[in-house]
Amino acid sequence: MFEGTEIKFGAGKKIAPPLSLGQIKRFAPQIKDMNIGALDAETVDLSVTLIHAALSRNYPEITTQEVEDNIDISQMAPAITAIMRISGFEENQPGKQGAGKK
């Protein structure tokens, strides 16, 4: 299991490791323009994708549907902020564009 940061997941918790270099490379264009805390469909979809990508490093069997079912709106911004921070990205305030700047 990779070291990481604990995030709320449903009634429990999971350890979310940093995104891998391959994952960062694959999602870099979307991360660069990410608006953490926004509730538009694009941001929610990207958040689910990134949370799933990080968690799948420690929980290979986890599905995107499980992420959607176990992360709610109140948990989304803290989870994605924690994953971005542990992955080495600058921490910006939720709701500010460019949250994925290195």
Image (cartoon, rainbow, N blue to C red):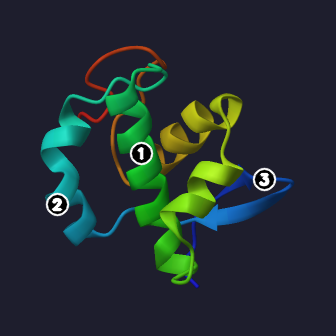
Residue drawn at (55%, 83%), measured in percent from left and top? 61
Q: Quadrant of residue 41?
A: top left
The residue at which mark 1 appears reads as 84
Q: Nearer the viewer, mark 3 or mark 2?
A: 3
Indicate the quadrant containing the C terminus: top left, top right, bottom left or bottom right. Answer: top left
Q: How many marks?
A: 3
Relative to 28, is 56 on the left or the right?
right
Residue drawn at (53%, 70%), measured in percent from left and top? 63
Q: Which mark is residue 26?
A: 2
Identify the mark nearer the N-term, 3 or 2. 3
Please provide percent x and percent y for residue 79.
Answer: 58, 43
Residue drawn at (70%, 64%), measured in percent from left and top? 14
Give amino acid for label 1.
Met
Give amino acid for label 2.
Arg
Residue 5 versus residue 79: which sits nearer the camera? Answer: 79
4 over 60 or under it: above or below: above
Q: Can residue 102 be seen? A: no
Assess whether mark 3 and mark 1 are in contact (beta carbons under 8 angstroms).
Answer: no
The residue at which mark 3 appears reads as 10
Identify the mark nearer the N-term, 2 or 1. 2
Mark 3 element type: loop
Q: Nearer the viewer, mark 2 or mark 1?
A: 2
